[in-house]
Image: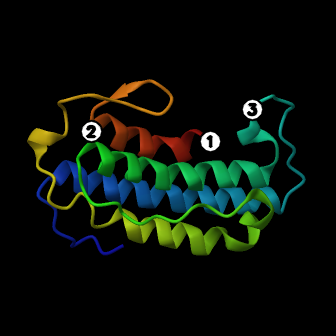
Amino acid sequence: MSSDLQYSSRAVRAMVLLHEEHLRRFVHTWRLALASPVSLPPTDDPAYASLEALGRHVLSAAGGYMTWMCEMLALPDPGIRSAPDAAAMVRDADDYMEHVLERWRAPLKEVSDDRLETPEYTSQWKTRYCIDSMLEHAVMHPIRH
């Protein structure tokens, strides 16, 4: 992404740039894991059912975070398509990642700092986030996985 994109909020700009950097790193590391004899530990968590499912989870969540922020801020739908299923993810991950990253660049460009910290909104998993904290969550999600 071009680092010269203009945003009303420098905080939003920084989070968009960091999100892109860390999602790209995740996909690179995920591909290394796919090419290695890595096995995930047994769990009931469907996001860890396989490396393919893990890739889908992280990439799908990236799109979901932006869609949620746009809904909460009453902004237009960013038009992020559904992630490929786990079986197709290995083949389609790079294309889907580029789609998500492209759709992340514009929606929050005009969001000012005063809309980042209040109010808080309830996420789909029932945790309350302000927009700033959801941006931070979105940046950290691929790092944590």
Residue 23 numbered mark, or none: none
**Circle 2 Cα neighbour tier, 10 Å, few/some/many (<14 / 14–19 / ≥20):** some
Q: Determine the image quadrant of residue 85.
A: bottom right
Q: Nearer the viewer, residue 131 or 75?
A: 75
For disc 2, the marked residue is 132
Residue 45 numbered mark, or none: 3
Which residue does the image show at 40% across and 52% down from the upper left? 67
Amino acid type of disc 1?
A: His
Q: Nearer the viewer, mark 1 or mark 3?
A: 3
The answer to whether the residue labelled 1 contacts the one labelled 2, judged by CB atoms less than 8 Å apart, is no
- Residue that extends furthest to the top in the rendered view of this protein: 127
Q: Nearer the viewer, residue 77 or 99?
A: 77
**Where is residue 66 shown, x and y percent of the image?**
39, 52
**Circle 3 Cα neighbour tier, 10 Å, few/some/many (<14 / 14–19 / ≥20):** few
Please, what secondary structure does the residue beneath circle 1 have?
loop
Q: CA distance from mark 1 to mark 2?
A: 21 Å
**Where is residue 16 shown, x and y percent of the image?**
33, 57
Upstream in sequence: badge 1 or badge 2: 2
Q: Quadrant of the C terminus?
A: top right
The answer to whether the residue labelled 3 contacts the one labelled 2, judged by CB atoms less than 8 Å apart, is no
**Where is residue 91 shown, x and y percent of the image?**
74, 73
Which residue does the image show at 90% across and 53% down from the upper left? 37
* Residue 62 in the image: above or below residue 3: above
For disc 1, the marked residue is 145
* Residue 65 in the image: above or below residue 43: below
